[in-house]
Amino acid sequence: MNKMKVFIGLVLACIGIAMIVSCFFQFPALDDLVPAYLKKEFGQFGSIHWYLTQSNGRYTTIPIFLLITPGPESIVWYPWLLLLFIVFAIVCTYWFLKVASRNLLTDQPGTSTLMLLSGMLNFTFLAIIPEVATYFYWLATSITYLFPFSLFLLYLTAWINYFSNNSNKWKQAIIISLLTLLLGGCNEVMMYFAFAIPFLIAAMLVASKHRIPQQFILIFAVTFLMAAIVLSMPGNLERTNHYGATQSLIISLTGSVFRTFKLILVLLTNPLFYISCAGVIIACTQLNPRIVEFFKTKRTNWIVELLTLVALLLCFDLLIRQLANNVIPPRAINILICITLIGCWWIIIMNSFRFAGLLNYIRTNYHKANTVYCSLFLIALLGSSFFKDVISNLMLLPVHATVLNQRVEAMETAKHNGLKTAVILPYSEAVNEQLQLRYKGKSRFVQEEFKLPPSFAYFKDEPFSEEHAFAYAEYYGIDTLVAGNARYLRRGLDESKRVHR
C-alpha cells in the first residue's frame, strides 16, 4: 500500500507541476481589464464605491479584486497571483481534511496521507467541474469563486469543530458568524449556502428531537444580517433591476428543472464521482462510534437528504432566474458541483450505520479495499478528459502565450513610436504562423487534434469582440485598436462605453 501511495503521489505531483506551469502562460481577460481603468478614473476607494453601487454587492471580494489586480505595468505578477489562490485553496483543503479526520475518525491520518488526500480531493474537483479555466486560471474568478470556496471549506471546518468540541462552542459560533459575513459578500453561491446551512442543521436537530444550542441565536442573527446587507446593496439592486422578475414563475421553474438536471448529470456521468463516494465509504470504517450513534437518532433518511440537496440546487437556480434575471454561468456551476459533491459525501457519512455489514467486510479486507480504490482513482483520473486537457494545454499554451505576447509587443511598439493606433493580427492567423514555426510539418495534425485557444486559458479574443475591444485597448493604453476591418476606441474615448460617476 505504501508503494501505491508513493506512486499516486508522484503522478499527482507531475500533474500538479503541469497545472502550476500553466499559470505562467495566462493573460488578463475581460473583468481583469476593468480595475486599471476604474482606479485611474475614480481612485482606489472611488472604484470600490462604483462597483458596489453600480455593478454588484460583493463587498468581500470586490475590494480585494480592485486592490491586487495588476495593471499593464505590473502584469508580470498575474501568474503569481493565480498561483497564490491555488496554494490557498490547497491549504484550506488540507486543513478541512485534517479537522474532519481528527473529529470524525478514530485514527488520525499522518501528514503525508493528508497531503495525498488533499491532492486527490482537488484533482477530483478539477476532473469533474465543466470549466477549469475559470476555476484556476482567470484572476477575476480566482478572487470571486476559488477564494470564497476555500473560505467555505473553512466554514464547514468551523461547523465540524462546533459539534465536536463542547468547551469552545461560543468560539466556534463566532468564527462561523464571521465567515458567514465574509461569504455573503463573496458571490451569490456562497451567500445562498451560508444562509441555508444553519437552518438545515437546525431542521435536522428539531426533526431528530435534539435541542437547538443557544449559540444558534447568534448564528441565525448574523445570517439574517448578512442576507439583509447583501440584498440591500445598491450594486445588487442595479444588477438585478431591483429584483423585478421579467418572466413568469412557470417559465423560470421549467428552466431551473432542466438546468438542475444538467448539473446533476455532470456528476452522475463522471466515474470519479462514484470512486470518490467509494473512498468515503472506506473512510466510514473508521468513523468515531460517538458520531455513528448520533446519526442513528436522526429522523431523516438518505432519500430525503438527497432530495433536499437537489431542492437546494433547484431553488438557487430559480432564485437567480426569477430575482436576478440571469442564468448561472459555468464559473458558478464549478463551485455548485464541488459543494454538491461534498454534500453527497456527507450524506454517505450520516447514513453509514445503514450499511454496517458492508463496512465490516471492508474492515476485514481494508488493505485490499484501499488498493482497489487507489487503483480505480488513478485509472479514472488518467483516463479523464481533464488529464487529456492537461497534456494538450502543455502543448498549446506556449503557442497561445506567444501570440498574445506579440499583440502586447505590437501595442507597446506603437506607443513607443508615438503612435496612437495599433494593428493586431487575427488570432487564427497568428496561431497558424506559430504552429508552423513550432511543429513544422505536424502543425496541421496539432490543429486537428487539439483545439485552440487552449481550454485552460480564459480567452475571449477581446480585440475582435465588439463588446470588449474597448476595454482591451484601454488596458494597454492604445487610443485606437485596429482588428481586421474594424476599429475600436479605448474606453476613455468611447463615450458609449465610459463609466460615469
Image (cartoon, helix red, strand yellow):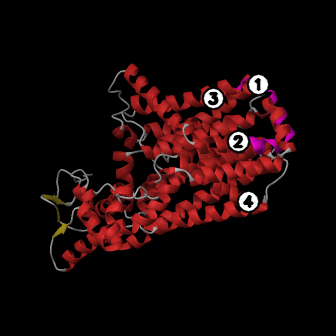
Question: What kind of residue is marked 2?
Answer: Ala
Q: Earlier in the sequence, mark 2 or mark 4?
A: 4
- Where is residue 324, by image quadrant? top left
Dot in front, 3 or 4: 4
**Mark 4, residue position:** 4
107 within the magenta span = no
Q: CA distance from mark 3 to mark 1?
A: 17 Å
Q: Secondary structure at mark 2?
A: helix
**In the image, is 38 to the left or to the right of 392?**
left
The answer to the question of whether label 3 and label 4 lie on touching residues, with beta carbons closer than 8 A, is: no
Which dot marks residue 278?
A: 2
Q: Counting other residues with Cα less than 10 Å from the Cα at mark 4, is it few (<14), some (14-19), or many (20 or more)?
A: few
Q: Earlier in the sequence, mark 1 or mark 2?
A: 1
Percent x, y of residue 363: 85, 43
Percent x, y of residue 240: 36, 36
Q: Residue at x 58, y 57 (%)?
A: 89
**In the image, is 266 to the left or to the right of 90?**
left
- Where is residue 468, by image quadrant? bottom left
281 within the magenta span = yes
Q: Nearer the viewer, residue 324 or 226?
A: 324
**Mark 3, residue position:** 306
The residue segment tinted magenta is: 280-301
Q: Earlier in the sequence, mark 2 or mark 3?
A: 2
Q: Secondary structure at mark 4?
A: helix
**Taking 235 as reference, is 405 above or below it?**
below
Percent x, y of residue 84: 53, 64
Q: Counting other residues with Cα less than 10 Å from the Cα at mark 2, is it few (<14), some (14-19), or many (20 or more)?
A: some
Q: Secondary structure at mark 3?
A: helix
Q: Earlier in the sequence, mark 3 or mark 1?
A: 1
**Mark 1, residue position:** 208
